[in-house]
Image: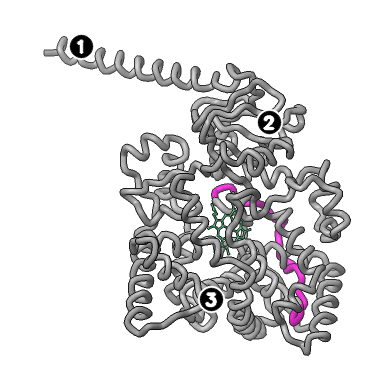
Amino acid sequence: MGLVIQDSLLEIFLLAVALVILTALHFHNAYKYWTKKGVPTIKPKFPLGNTNTFLPQGFSIGPITKTFYDELKREGHKFGGVYLVTVPNLVVVDPDYVRDILSKDFQYFADRGFYHNKKGDPLIANLFVIDSADWRGLRVKLTPTFTSGKMKTMFHSVVECANYMKEAIVKSIGQDVDMKEIVGRYTTDVIGTCAFGIECNSFKHPDAEFRAMGRALFTFNIFRALKAFLAISFPKLALQMGLKVSNEKVGNFFRKVVKDSVKLRQEENIQRNDFLQLLINLQESANFTLDQMTAQVISFFIAGFETSATTMNFGLYELARNPDIQKKLREEICQVLDKHDNKLTYESLNEMKYLGQVLDETLRMYPSLPTLNRRCTKDYTLRDTNIVIEKGTRVLIPALGLQMDPEFYPNPEKFDPDRFTEENKKMRHPFVHLPFGDGPRNCIGLRFGQMQSKIGIATIVKNFQLSVSASAKPLEFNFSSFLLQPKKTIYLKIQKV
Ligand code: HEM
């Protein structure tokens, strides 16, 4: 009897040893991928490859890619290879290669390469994640939603939401305010109105369902972190397991909103000027299913409110730290409004050139998406080399790295909107400012994002004086979040102008 137990223990022990050896061999071989190709690498460490130095802070690839960029650039490389666990990723450093990949040779890099389980988890199959075969047709169909003509028709509704925000801020005069919460309510109201024709009233009802859904989407817990880790590091296994990454509560909420709105509009023959209407019109011509529509609506909601809210939060923080720039911006806003009957219109907003520069500089230092992703869709030879990037290889474009590089932006930590005058812009490589990406797969909502951010900032700066709260700590980034976020809440002091 004792002998049998001993034999079994021995077998288990040998099996475990074999497993460890096989795993180590697998990692050892995987970590040779780039060297075999002659691509410079940053030495990976077992078992997480190039991500492990950042644990336990988190392993969001956004801010981490900047450190890859800095290290490769320091060594004089134009590109390099890293491993996310064992998955090889090409990191592009030289802006000419960035241009090749995003724009010139886009046909080789039309996928973003994000994990999605199209069949088992249809609500995740949105324009942002789907692969080129499905993406092309959908992008063409959705593009008319975001023309400048459409922006003009939505302009008034956005200004109305900004006015609700102004009324709410008046109540906080003299206090330390979490600006992110305020601008988050504003952008939730904007997207509610412009996407669904629904008044969310986040200022009157801060716990309104739309706002709650926004919070649920960006609340991070260990369970979601593990899912994301599995999807990024072992995408094939995740797909075989049928891993779902969409948030069920949020999915059910939006499925119902879309279903009810479609029913109401069809029954009562209502036509509106919003994103949902365009999707309804598409449904009739393109056989869109309810889930396909809901997936797009959720992505507009996510992209529409959180990116602009974080941008405004960072922008207002820099204006609070730089009173001279804040004053100059306020003077421009007042001068232009004076000429336009004191009305914020599509035309008057476009006349505020310095406001545009403030936004560009904010997005330089704080791009919501600090890393752009592409996946190679057919074998591709990197220009002026013999290096073949194989089909399926993931590519990381370090937007934050490029935008904080002193070669392109001297003294990069300094907030200086004058970097974005027309003359100064012309003197730089066009692919070193990528807050909305570039090429055919750039941000489809660029105009809308700029419009709502500018209206929000102009309304606040015209009416309120901002300063940094005395208890403010130096800003650090949150390494666990997909979008660039501050680690701690930013509090600003508000005074009436
Ligand atoms: C300040 C606001 C915004 C910023 C900074 C931003 C940034 C970005 C970036 C960097 C990308 C990836 C581009 C690339 O890979 O080349 C992107 C894609 C996208 N954005 Fe935005 N965005 C903003 C607002 C919006 C808004 C308001 C919407 C929609 C209502 C939107 C919808 C999308 C969609 C659908 C994609 C995927 C496009 C595709 O793959 O064809 N974004 N955005």
Circle 1 residues within 10 Å: few <14, some 14–19, many ≥20? few
The percent position of residue 175, horizontal first and vertical second, equals: 68, 78
Toward the left, the furthest residue is 1
Q: CA distance from mark 3 to mark 1?
A: 68 Å
Q: Amino acid at mark 1?
A: Asp
User: Residue, x 49% and y 65% (percent of image)?
Assistant: 301
Q: Amino acid at mark 2?
A: Phe
Mark before the other along the chain sequence, 3 or 1: 1
Q: Is residue 28 above or below residue 390?
A: above
Q: Amino acid at mark 3?
A: Asp
Q: Which residue is mark 2?
A: 79
The percent position of residue 23, horizontal first and vertical second, equals: 41, 21
Label 2 element class:
strand
Q: Which mark is residue 7?
A: 1
**Magenta span of residues:** 462-481
Q: Is residue 112 above or below residue 28?
A: below
Q: Which mark is residue 455?
A: none
Q: Which residue is mark 3?
A: 189
Q: Quadrant of the N terminus?
A: top left
| 67 sits left or right of 374 in the view | right
Label 3 element class:
helix
The percent position of residue 162, horizontal first and vertical second, equals: 63, 79
Q: Nearer the viewer, residue 408 or 377?
A: 377
